[in-house]
Amino acid sequence: MFKKKDLLLILPALAIAAGMLFWNYFHTDTQPLTAVVEEKGQVIHTYNLSAQKTTQVINIGGKYHVKLLLEPGKISFLHSDCPDQICVRTGKLTKAGQAAVCLPAQVSVRIVSKKSEVDGITG
């Protein structure tokens, strides 16, 4: 089934995979994360997620009564009166480069840091 020479290929590949897994699991990003909230293309709020210590509900208001949930290291859409609720189902944003948008309310939330975790952004 396996030959001894096969192990010369398999063992290094497993060692590299395990090393990458542990690096990803234990590596913590020291860059501060900032949540940028925009309405109709204009920045209306910025929140330092790295310094956030309490849970807070932010009322954006507007035609669709948008509310955001700000938690330590996280932000999400808590409520919106929009018909499809995609923004609420997006979940919690925790990493640089993540974004959520409520199109009917024209409200967007994105996470930024000095070191982004995305390869590129179009638009």
Image (spheres, rainbow, N blue to C red):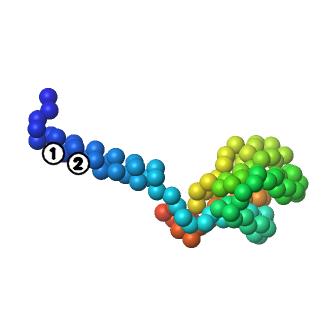
The residue sitting at 62% across, 54% down in the picture is 94
Image x and y of residue 113, in percent: 59, 67
Q: Is residue 116 left or right of residue 49?
A: left
Dot 1 crowding, Cα within 10 Å, few <14, some 14–19, many 20+: few
Q: Is residue 11 left or right of residue 63?
A: left
Quadrant into which the N terminus falls: top left
The disc placed on residue 12 is 2
The residue sitting at 30% across, 50% down in the picture is 16
Q: Is residue 13 left or right of residue 44?
A: left
Q: Nearer the viewer, residue 56 or 99?
A: 56
Q: Based on the displayed image, in which of its 4 quarters is residue 6 positioned?
A: top left
Q: Amino acid at mark 2?
A: Pro
The residue sitting at 22% across, 44% down in the picture is 11
Query: Considering the numbered disc 2 on the image, is that residue within a helix, a strand or a loop?
Result: helix
Q: Amino acid at mark 1?
A: Leu
Q: Nearer the viewer, residue 38 or 52?
A: 52
Q: Kindly tell me whether residue 35 is visible in this rendering.
A: no
Dot 2 crowding, Cα within 10 Å, few <14, some 14–19, many 20+: few
- Residues at circles 2 and 1 in contact by the CB criterion of under 8 Å: yes
Residue furthest to the top in view is 1
The residue sitting at 82% across, 56% down in the picture is 58
Name the residue beneath numbered marker 1. 8
State the CA–CA distance, disc 2 to disc 1. Answer: 7 Å
Q: Nearer the viewer, residue 12 or 26?
A: 26
